[in-house]
Image (spheres, rainbow, N blue to C red):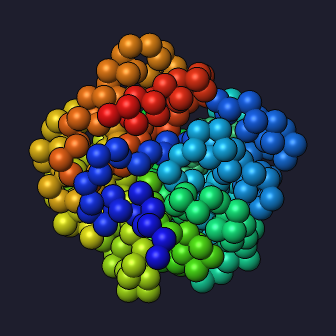
Amino acid sequence: MAEKKTILKALAGETQAVPPIWMMRQAGRYLPEYRATRAEAGDFLSLCYNSDLATEVTLQPIRRYGFDAAILFADILLLPQALGADLWFVTGEGPRLSTITEQADFDKLKPASDIHDTLAPVYQTVRNLARDLPDETTLIGFAGAPWTVATYMIAGRGTPDQGPAHALKAENRDLFEQVMERLTEGTIDYLSMQIDAGAEVVKLFDSWAGSLKGDDFDRYATGPAKRIIAALKDRHPDVPVIAFPREAGDGYIGFHEATGADCVAIDDSVTPEWAAEHVQAGGCVQGNLASSHMVTGGDDLVRETRRIVDAFKSGPHIFNLGHGITPDADPDNVHRMIEAVRAG
Ligand code: CP3
């Protein structure tokens, strides 16, 4: 029987002498080959919905660096688009969507069961990747967590403090919860279809979890993650789930247990020593190198990389950044990071 893949070993709770590695946004604008394929596609969304080109950009960082996992090339905002929201990207600024401010805006959306026609090219990309990836590389599918996606759907754009979503939650909780419910149902179906198409692991990105405080964190970050993971485990009991409640702080403690996640991804606002003590006891952790090191490089990059590997060495760990690599990163620094992890 073939040896189990390194990422799957970590997700099964195995401690490994050299942790497996991948990088958030590993297919992205810091790579010249990504920029070339994106130019060929025309724009970012056309790239996401072109299965051949999305397959190509997913494979680019695997060819260049030999990462242990590939993450499907797509975006968390494709789900709102499949639910009927308008979506477009303004170059240099980011995403724009139709907003949700009143019941009539929500009533225009489609039921969760109607998302699959729009998302069919994404499932095709997953099938292509399951066919084309090297045997040792794990294929990760993903979706945004309901709260994070809701912040974009409600505001119609990215916001520094998620103000419009917090305001809707305070002023019209019923409508806010209808949005969360539709996204929770859609996310379960979307991830389940990615798994059917060949995703071996799925990840839930809650990039704005850190702005949910107190009971809100339990209700709108932990609660939906728990429901989504339970539904996925029901349908696909052997597929591991990575949860990323970014900037959760103390909320990271017990997140594995509270949600059933096999791995919790850690951003760079906490130290690896703290996370090893308080979070890794619950299961595999992923993270948490500051992405800025991929821009600045040098001895600090090597030192911080080694510090993270050492801090997490007594338990299951997948090496990653604390957030996505940025367009100004130097591709050579990625080689230095990988060498530092594997130098062990
Ligand atoms: O990690 C990967 O390589 C897989 C692909 C992936 C993308 N976005 C591609 C992308 C994944 C997993 C995402 C997740 C995503 N998208 C999140 C959650 C993770 C995070 O970064 O917090 C969020 C919040 C989004 C929404 C989104 N997509 C924003 C706010 C933006 C604009 C900001 C930016 O970086 O330009 C995007 C665009 C986007 N998604 C790009 C890529 C490679 C850049 C688009 C381009 O090529 O111009």
Quadrant including the C terminus:
top left
x, y percentage for residue 299?
Answer: 38, 13
Left-right relation of 164 to 226 = right
Q: How many marks?
A: 0
Left-right relation of 124 to 239 = right
User: Given the current orientation, which residue lies at the most extreme bottom position?
Assistant: 235
User: Residue 310's quadrant in the figure?
Assistant: top left
Left-right relation of 168 to 189 = left
In the image, residue 293 above or below residue 37: above
State whether residue 239 appears in this view: yes
The residue at the point 34 percent across, 44 percent down is 18
State whether residue 164 appears in this view: no
x, y percentage for residue 112?
Answer: 57, 78
Q: Please tell me in which quarter of the rendered image ligand 1 is found.
A: top right
Pick whichever, 270 or 277, lies toward us: 277
Pick whichever, 193 or 59, lies toward us: 59
x, y percentage for residue 52?
Answer: 80, 59
In the image, residue 81 above or below residue 305: below
User: Given the current orientation, which residue lies at the most extreme front position?
Assistant: 1
Pick whichever, 168 or 207, lies toward us: 207
The residue at the point 14 percent across, 55 percent down is 281
Left-right relation of 241 to 16 = right
The residue at the point 73 percent across, 56 percent down is 55
The residue at the point 39 percent across, 69 percent down is 240
x, y percentage for residue 307?
Answer: 26, 29
User: Given the current orientation, which residue lies at the most extreme left position?
Assistant: 277
